[in-house]
Image (spheres, grey):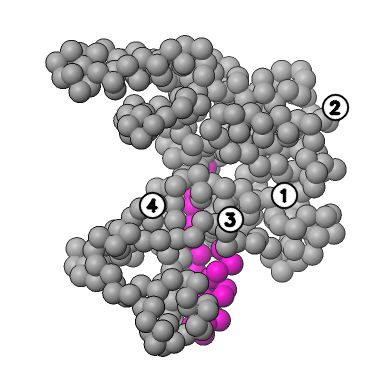
Amino acid sequence: SLKCGILGLPNVGKSTLFRAITEIQVDAQNYPFCTIEPNVAMVAVPDERLAVLAKIVKTQILVPTTIEIMDIAGLVKGASKGEGLGNKFLSHVREARALIHVVRCFEDPNVIHVEGTIDPKRDIEIIETELALADLESMEKQLQRIDKESRIDKKMFSKATFAHTVYEALCKGIPARSLPQNDDEIIWLSSFFLLTSKPILYVANVHERDAVTGNIFSKTVSTYAAQNNAQAITISANIEADIAMLPPGERLEYLQTIGLTSSGLDKMIQACYTLLHLQTYFTAGEKEVRAWTVPKNATAAEAAGVIHSDFQKGFIRAEVMSYNDLVTYGSEQKVKEAGKLNIEGKAYRVQDVPFDATHKSS
Ligand code: GDP
């Protein structure tokens, strides 16, 4: 499943954020194959193309695609030693495909900081170090095997060299994702199954008054992310919690009164979706318009398999049109007449336009 795990030091706003996410989660009844766990919320990935398509094919039923967000409680220093809560923490991190790291960027004398002061870089490094320590243990075991393999098979030599580079970095507390990676290295790295190589989104949680502009702390977080092959966004968890409590129809107006144009949670969910290396394709008809999720580079046959595994087995060809063509020509018939309806075989790679290019969130 496509789980993103929320983690962070105590008192940074994780529960506040997770509560907001729980408020906006989708009705599980519409997704009968999902299991429900108390620390996991399923959220719709906002995509305004759904409404556009619904108008064209004249349906009222819009089914967005979803991702799951998991609340990973209980990071304490020393988690990597695997005692009590630490074990549970690490197994939750392992379960997550991507990580959402909430970083405290708000000052509030009434909310103590476990480390005494507000210092986002230090906080990020505390957690990365815990994860790096767990990875270090795992790499130690793997290195013995990889070294042995490289003595037998010369082709394995570069992989072994890279494995040692990763190990050295982890020794210094540097997350594996921060290392520069070529195509081979990306594949090797994923074969090591490390925690610090999971894609990560830093969420700089700022005070309500800084929600629009960010602040000096959130800037530190953005800079850190840019330098370490990670993503960052700025939100105020308190505001998100307030907005999530409102009926959906009233949220935009409230956002605008405080000077925001889009919900921070929406931005966060879209950022997670991108982080997971996913893309969307649509099915559209009178019955419903529906967004489906496939990995980037998925073939048409794999995409059909997301709807039903039988569709993948029996796949011969699909009629494909691009979203933009459908919007431009206004109906399937007109797309066909313009010669833009293509018959594609098994190996056709599904194409999405990146979110940022098409999506003005509202
Ligand atoms: P957790 O320990 O990381 O789950 O943190 P909580 O969500 O429980 O938040 C700890 C405290 O910080 C609570 O009193 C929250 O009200 C406060 N807090 C969280 N987010 C914000 C925020 O955006 N602005 C302000 N001013 N306080 C916040």
Q: Is mark 1 within 8 Å of ligand 1?
A: yes
**Can you say which quadrant of the picture contains the C terminus?**
bottom right
Q: Nearer the viewer, residue 273 or 66?
A: 273
Which residue: 40% across, 16% down? 165
Q: Is residue 47 magenta?
A: yes
First along the sequence among labels 4 and 2 = 2
Question: Residues at badges 1 and 4 in contact (C-beta under 8 Å)?
Answer: no
Q: Amino acid at mark 1?
A: Ala
Residue 296 lies, in percent from the top left, at: 39, 52
Of circles 2 and 3, which is in front? Answer: 3
Q: Nearer the viewer, residue 81 or 146?
A: 146
Residue that extends furthest to the front in the rendered view of this protein: 338
Q: Amino acid at mark 4?
A: Pro
SS label for mark 4: strand
Question: In the shown orientation, is residue 287 left or right of residue 344?
Answer: right
Q: Nearer the viewer, residue 226 or 282?
A: 226
SS label for mark 1: helix
SS label for mark 3: helix
Question: Residues at badges 2 and 1 in contact (C-beta under 8 Å)?
Answer: no
Residue 348 lies, in percent from the top left, at: 29, 62
Q: Which residue is mark 4?
A: 295
For the residues marked 1 and 4, what is the alpha-carbon distance in whole angstroms? 31 Å
Q: Crowding near pointer 4: few (<14 within 10 Å), some, many (20+)?
A: some
For the residues marked 2 and 3, what is the alpha-carbon distance in whole angstroms? 38 Å
Residue 66 lies, in percent from the top left, at: 49, 57
Which residue: 49% across, 68% down? 63
Q: Amino acid at mark 2?
A: Pro
Q: Which residue is mark 2?
A: 109
Residue 185 tag number: none
Of circles 4 and 2, which is in front? Answer: 4
| Magenta stretch bounds | 46-70
